[in-house]
Amino acid sequence: MTDTATPRRLTLLQHHDVMIDFETGGIPVSKAMLLQNGSMAPPVFLSIGAVVFNPYDSKPNPDLMREFMFYRNVEPNSCLELGGKYDPATLRWWKQQDPEAVASLKENRQPVKKVLEDFFLWISNFRAPIHVQWANDPSFDLVLLKHWCILANVTYTFKYGNEGSCRTIKRLAWPDSPVPNFHEGVAHNAGEDCIGQGLTVQAAHYLLNLRRR
């Protein structure tokens, strides 16, 4: 995995979208996250993964996606200091997941502010603009990204009208049949999840006969 990409390799993409995924210690709307003033605390941010990819590529290449991947683990205490909170039900859920995925969240943790600053610096290194910011569900991942940017005082540089939903495009591409599983790596690793979701978006574009304008 790498956080940088050379201009020569970037030409392989031709069109730039980004897939974003988070792993967290809670969900945004639950009783466990409710504060005394009636507002919701943001869940503790555990990791962020992202891949820049071409959704119109009809020849999926997960190895190429790994060349254009960003991945960071977050120091949970840095989130707690800014008002983040754990959801006990989510922590119980994590105990039931793949030990490899759980162990990977504890490696090379960094403060949430630095992680977000590094992420947007990585995005700025791409010379061509990012057209669409994809997430499995933007109402979760991208809302959290915006929220944590506010709390950590980091500028959110994406355009708000350019959000794409994996769940929506899957319903359009496979309305009456199971969605193929394109995930090859460890489940609930934010970087590997992004690759699987990116491959799904590429397959959906092909099935829906979507072409670059």
Image (tube, helix red, strand yellow):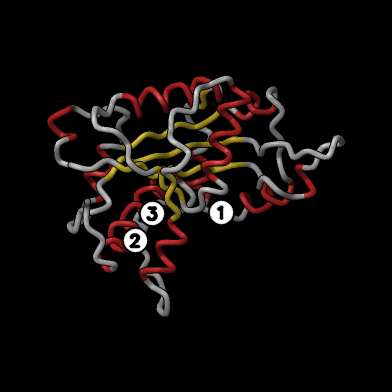
Give the foreground label among 3 and 2.
3
Spot occupied by residue 131 in the image (x, y as percentages of width and height): 32, 41
Q: Residue at x 17, y 57 (%)?
A: 59
**Left or right of 34 in this view: 185:** left
Q: Which residue is mark 2?
A: 182
Residue 204 position by quadrant: bottom left
Rounded to the nearest angstrom, the CA distance separating label 3 from label 2 is 7 Å
Position of residue 186 in the picture relative to residue 6 (left or right): right
Would you name the residue on which mark 3 appears? 197
The amino acid type found where label 1 is placed reads Gln
Q: Residue under circle 1? A: 97
SS class, disc 1: loop
Circle 3 residues within 10 Å: few <14, some 14–19, many ≥20: many
Q: Which one is earlier in the sequence, the residue at label 1 or at label 2?
A: 1
Q: Hey, which quadrant is residue 34 in on the image?
A: top right
Task: Find the distance from the CA under tag 1 to the CA under tag 2.
Answer: 19 Å
Residue 63 placed where, x, y %?
23, 46
Please state if 204 lies on the left or on the right of 166 as rendered: left
Q: Judge depth for marks 1 and 2 and give the one in front.
A: 2
Q: Amino acid at mark 2?
A: Phe
Query: In which quadrant will I find the N terminus?
Result: top left
Callout 1: few (<14), some (14-19), or many (20+) C-alpha neighbours within 10 Å? few
In the picture, measured across the screen, residue 124 lies left or right of residue 154, that is: left
Q: Quadrant of residue 197?
A: bottom left
Q: Secondary structure at mark 2?
A: loop
Labels 3 & 2 near each other (Cβ < 8 A):
yes
Q: Residue at x 41, y 26 (%)?
A: 120
Determine whether 119 is above or below 57 in the image: above
